[in-house]
Image (cartoon, helix red, strand yellow):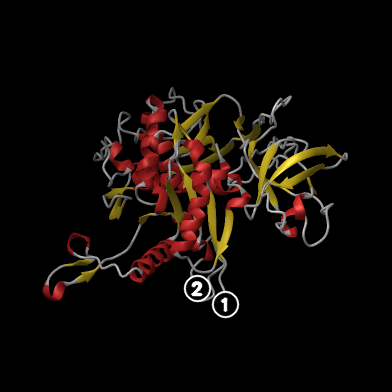
């Protein structure tokens, strides 16, 4: 069982030269024998160090879908029962439409309602549909208020564009010929494509066998004097960070005609798939100036309605930067103080004794009403000061560090809502090209030795054809900081 403090170094042991890194322990050989397992283990390993969280939460936890084509599609079933908007200026005018039981009229664009349907407006006013006709552009609804009080009327704002109506049920008279309709919703098809990532590095013949004078530290704190080991650490660390960035930021690059204008050196198209952020429903992206408990509660409650389609899993994960972690903790602390809650005994944030007291309090998870839970996870890319150069006007920290990307990792029948997608056998390819030496320190000493390169050393190549799939984009969302100077 993997522990929290894991590292790619735990996959192979370090031996002294001249035997070097033997073939059985070398990473490229491990990939050759168990590529899918190796990728999952390494993704998990780097992810637990908060470096590659997306890789850990998808491939590192086994949430990977393998496909045989570059392009992949899936169906998203919309809601059959939904509120529809008034689409045009009201036909019924005046300040008191529906007064005295008189019919009133309004327009909708969707053919969702039927005669005999009892419908309800945004403010809760109920009415029954007596007639529907189509004028070629809209459906004109004729309805009467359900309330028998002849002094009642409907607020005119409820039949103006932007107002919404939904159906409750259908009622009919005795000896009726038919009832309300049954509505069916055809699923919408979503499409994405894989992105091919690649990385290479070279090692000279001398460096392949040299021992460095100073010791350098690897990701888990272990030391090495072997330059080859350091090169492997560095390349893998950068490689998984690049994978996470591609899964997050990549933008779908086929135009409306299905063409890709980006071309590589050999003039073949360079395909980019939609990353995680592009797939999140635009309707679920909101801005904030100060994070509060109430803001989180309201936003997550909205997301939870859509999460019902994924087994009612209300355990959301929010990826955020260091400043977002602080905002979250402060918001929950303020809520705690407002309620007059005092943390005592085993829940205290005070550690140590006497003059060695330490205050260590910070919140990373909160459970709201209705069982909705949010856990925040520090996400390294949002703190990348090289990429994110727009700073908060007060704190001078990257404004991106305040972003919350809230994800629903619910599952249905073992299928995760968010998962990595990879070309079969191409999830994370790795190979080396030998020149004068191999990665194992074997220098060629015979004219009969066949090598693939004239390089005085060797090369290592990494390649992945991957993407990410958000099965239901409406069950995820983002809170984006809009700072005030």
Q: Which residue is mark 1?
A: 485
Q: Residue furthest right?
A: 136
Q: Which mark is residue 410?
A: none
Quarter of the picture holding the C terminus: bottom right
Q: Nearer the viewer, mark 1 or mark 2?
A: 1
Left or right, 50 with respect to 290, comes to left
User: Residue visible at 64% across and 31% down?
Assistant: 187
Rendered residue at 34%/47% (across/down) = 48
User: Which of 164/364 is in front?
Assistant: 164
- Give the percent coordinates (x, y) of residue 202: 46, 43
Residue 381 x, y percent position in the rendering = 48, 55
Q: Is residue 164 left or right of residue 335?
A: right
The kind of secondary structure element at disc 1 is loop
Query: Mark 1 vs mark 2: which is more N-terminal?
Result: 2
Between the C-alphas of marks 1 and 2, the distance is: 11 Å
| Residue 372 in view | no
Q: Quadrant of residue 358?
A: bottom left
Image: 449 above or below 44: above
Badge 2 density bin: few <14, some 14–19, many ≥20, Cα 10 Å:
few
Q: Which residue is mark 2?
A: 396
Residue situated in front as seen by the camera: 422 or 107: 107
In the figure, residue 41 lies in which quadrant?
Answer: top left
Q: Quadrant of the N terminus?
A: top left
Inspect this view and state whether residue 144 appears.
Answer: yes
């Amino acid at each position: 069982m993997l522990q929290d403090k894991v590292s790619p170094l735990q996959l192979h042991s370090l031996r002294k030269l001249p035997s070097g890194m033997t073939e059985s322990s070398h990473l490229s050989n491990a990939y050759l024998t168990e590529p899918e397992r190796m990728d999952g283990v390494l993704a998990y390993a780097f992810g637990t160090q908060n470096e590659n969280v997306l890789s850990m939460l998808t491939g590192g936890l086994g949430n990977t879908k393998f496909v045989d084509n570059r392009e992949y599609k899936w169906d998203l079933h919309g809601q059959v029962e939904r509120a529809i908007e008034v689409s045009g200026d009201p036909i019924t005018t005046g300040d008191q439409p529906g007064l005295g039981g008189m019919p009133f009229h309004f327009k909708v664009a969707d053919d969702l309602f039927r005669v005999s349907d009892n419908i309800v407006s945004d403010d809760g006013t109920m009415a029954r549909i007596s007639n529907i006709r189509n004028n070629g552009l809209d459906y004109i609804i004729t309805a009467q208020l359900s309330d028998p009080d002849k002094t009642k009327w409907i607020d005119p704002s409820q039949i103006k564009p932007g107002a919404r109506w939904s159906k409750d049920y259908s009622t009919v008279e005795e000896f009726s010929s038919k009832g309300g309709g049954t509505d069916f919703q055809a699923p919408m098809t979503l499409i994405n494509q894989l992105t091919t990532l690649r990385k290479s590095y070279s090692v000279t013949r001398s460096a392949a066998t040299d021992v460095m004078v100073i010791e350098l530290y690897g990701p888990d704190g272990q030391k090495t004097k072997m330059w080859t080991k350091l090169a492997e650490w560095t390349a893998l660390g950068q490689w998984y960070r690049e994978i996470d960035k591609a899964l997050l930021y990549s933008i779908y690059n086929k135009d409306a005609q299905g063409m890709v204008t980006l071309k590589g050196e050999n003039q073949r198209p360079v395909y980019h798939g939609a990353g995680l952020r592009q797939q999140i429903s635009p309707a679920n992206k909101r801005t904030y100036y100060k994070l509060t408990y109430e803001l989180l509660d309201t936003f997550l409650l909205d997301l939870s309605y859509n999460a019902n389609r994924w087994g009612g899993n209300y355990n959301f994960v929010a990826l955020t930067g260091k400043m977002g972690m602080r905002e979250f903790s402060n918001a929950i602390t303020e809520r705690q103080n407002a309620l007059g809650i005092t943390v005592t005994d085993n829940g205290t944030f005070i550690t140590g004794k006497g003059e060695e007291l330490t205050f260590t309090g910070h919140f990373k998870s909160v459970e709201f009403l209705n069982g909705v839970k949010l856990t925040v996870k520090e996400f390294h890319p949002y703190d990348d000061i090289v990429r994110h150069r727009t700073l908060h006007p007060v704190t001078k920290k990257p404004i991106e560090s305040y972003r919350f990307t809230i994800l629903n990792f619910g599952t249905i029948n073992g299928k995760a809502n968010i998962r990595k997608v990879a070309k079969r056998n191409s999830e994370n390819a790795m190979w080396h090209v030998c020149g004068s030496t191999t990665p194992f320190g074997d220098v060629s000493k015979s004219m009969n030795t066949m090598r693939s390169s004239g390089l005085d050393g060797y090369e290592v190549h990494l390649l992945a054809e991957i993407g990410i799939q958000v099965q239901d984009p409406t069950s995820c969302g983002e809170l984006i900081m809009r700072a005030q100077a």
